Image: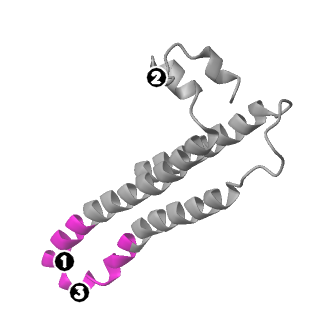
Amino acid sequence: MGDNVAYCESEYCNQGWNELFSHMSPYGYANFGIAFGLGFSVVGAAWGIWLTGSSLVGAAVKAPRIRSKNLISVIFCEATAIYGVIMAIILSNKIKTPEDAMGEDWDWNGFYYAGYGMFSAGLSVGLTNIASG
């Protein structure tokens, strides 16, 4: 990352979106992936609970005897939030500091590849859970 600073057009590497995203830390990408995965999973679960809960209230008015039987659908919606929490824990355990010092022969491509991979994993989990809500 030390070599990349020389290619910045501005002092803080914030001239444009390309410059901003290309100089962002891989740890930042990994943490944003965890945050998006957890956040979108919770939003998807809340959306599913809201949709099924409102229909269950209407169904409970017409047939009160099936009120407790319909709560299983709310539990399925909560499972998506739990899945997001589990994936956030797994992804956060993957973030580690490098064992050797960042010398001149440091593998920056692998470092960024891992950050992009964790970002895409968290984002795909979150978007899948928000779509299933």
Nearer the N terminus, badge 3 or badge 1? Answer: 1
Residue 96 screen position, x and y as percent:
71, 55
Q: Is residue 81 above or below residue 105?
A: below
Question: Which residue occupies the foreground of this view, 112 or 89?
Answer: 112
Question: Is there CB contact under 8 Å for labels 1 and 2?
Answer: no
Left of 46 or right of it: where is 110? right
Which residue is at the front of the view, 24 or 47? 24
Residue ID for mark 2: 14
Q: In this rendering, is residue 53 above or below 23?
A: below
Q: Residue at x 84, y 47 (%)?
A: 100
Residue at image point 75% right, 32% down? 108
Mark 3: few, some, or many residues within 10 Å (few <14, many ≥20)?
A: few
Check disc 1 and give the amino acid type.
Ala
Q: Main secondary structure of the magenta part?
A: helix
Q: In this orientation, which residue lies closer to the viewer: 1 or 56?
A: 1
Element type at marker 3? helix
Q: Residue 60 — which label?
A: 1
Question: Which residue appears at 50% of the width and 20% of the height?
Answer: 11
In the rendered image, the residue lying farthest to the top is 9
Query: Which kind of residue does numbered mark 2 sit on?
Result: Asn
The magenta segment is 53-74
Q: CA distance from mark 3 to mark 2?
A: 61 Å
Furthest residue toward right:
105
Along the viewing direction, whichever of 72 and 77 lies nearer the viewer: 77
Mark 2, secondary structure of its residue: loop
> Label 1, label 2: how many angstroms apart (C-alpha)?
56 Å
Q: Which labelled disc corresponds to residue 65?
A: 3
Q: Residues within 10 Å of mark 1 (few under 14, many from 20)?
A: some
